[in-house]
Amino acid sequence: MRTLLGTVMILVGMQAAAGPEQGREMPLPATFVGVLPCADCPGIEYRLELFADGAYYLRTTYQEREDGQLDDIGTWLRSSDGEILALHGGREAPVMFAIAGPDRLDKLDFEGRPIVSDLNHALSRTSGLDPLEPSLYMRGMFSYFADGALFEECLTGHKMPVAMEADYLRLEQAYLQARREPGEALLANLRGRIVARVNMEGLARPSVIVEEFLGIWPRESCGARFSSAEFNETYWKLTQLDGEPVFVGERQREAHMIFRAGEPPSVSGSTGCNRFTGGFERDGAALRFSRFAGTMMACPDTMEQESAFHRAMDAVRSWRIIGQHLELSDAEGRLRARLEAVYLR
């Protein structure tokens, strides 16, 4: 097996649901289980479910630990040679396995290299498929129309009906207040479970139970999966400001910014009311704005939001990009603004 030297190299050229002609066959759907080593507990129980559409469910349980269960969902990718499987979900880095055969997966380290050890690092295929009911924090596009609610989960791309129970009513009420037209899909955050529910046709179908509604974010989307936007020369649309959703006033532009490399580097955009230009200094993860100037129009609907925007930009000291989203934080690490990449045609 080839050795890959980093996560970036591993993800380049990987495909979801690669066919059997690419490396070893791996009939799907499939469930793989095993108990892997743990540094401070007897072992970590793995239960991995791979689906033919490229999605996965993963449960890891740390033995003899209170609250030791962790669920994750996402999309699995296979290397171009078919020998490595990478799980791209809600964790900071992909979880990687070597495909040792149709019935075995060997855990790899964080850089995709074999783990040299006499301990067990293998998962084995089980004889049947007994789907998990993962419980976790989720982000997805929620829509409601004609007494039906749907949730398109960001990491898997799965579209699932939403059960009208538990904390569902708060989600629906927030959605109805924020939507601009019937059936519009809005990004929602929630803590919930994915369970199998029998529909009117008598078929079991995954459904979402909203255990805790956390927020709804108009004008924000999941963003493209498995790619990251560039800091410079990207149109960044403002979607959150100090934990509150950003709205666009009637007949006004959306708040946005564009960073441009140069000597000196510059930033320009709109607060949603007035246009602005300024400078910035970026060194690694550090970021500081300077020399902001702009027009001085009065926009009653968004003046308070504009003031909050300038206060937030004055406080920004760091940045990071997660996929298609740019997060700006202050010196204490508090998220002050969240922006989404928009690709203009």
Image: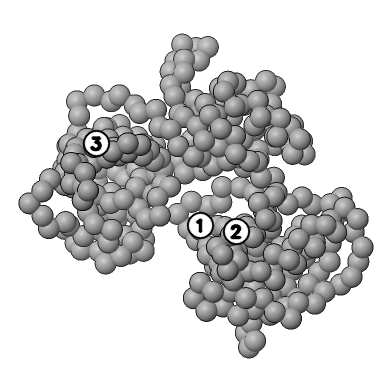
Residue that mark 3 sits on: 64
Q: Residue at x 44, y 24 (%)?
A: 195
Q: Residue at x 54, y 74 (%)?
A: 286
In-front residue for pair 307/172: 307
As drawn, the label of residue 323 is: 1
Q: Residues within 10 Å of mark 1 (few under 14, many from 20)?
A: some
Instruction: Report the Cα–Cα distance between label 2 and label 3.
Output: 35 Å
Q: Residues within 10 Å of mark 2 (few under 14, many from 20)?
A: some
Q: Which amino acid type is shown beneath numbered disc 2?
A: Leu
User: Percent position (x, y) of residue 160?
Assistant: 52, 29
Q: Is residue 304 left or right of residue 32?
A: right
Q: Is residue 162 left or right of residue 266?
A: left
Which quarter of the picture shows residue 125? top left
Identify the secondary structure beneath mark 2: strand
Residue that mark 2 sits on: 335
Q: Determine if residue 160 is in view.
A: no
Q: Residue furthest left?
A: 118
Instruction: Report the Cα–Cα distance between label 3 and label 1.
Output: 35 Å
User: Percent position (x, y) of residue 242?
Assistant: 67, 55
Looking at the image, tell me whether mark 3 or mark 1 is earlier in sequence order.
Answer: 3
Which quarter of the picture shows residue 180? top right
As drawn, the label of residue 151 is: none
| Front disc: 2 or 1 | 2
Q: Is residue 88 left or right of residue 209?
A: left
Identify the secondary structure beneath mark 1: loop
Is 70 located above or below residue 288 in the figure?
above
In-front residue for pair 249/98: 249
| Front disc: 2 or 3 | 3
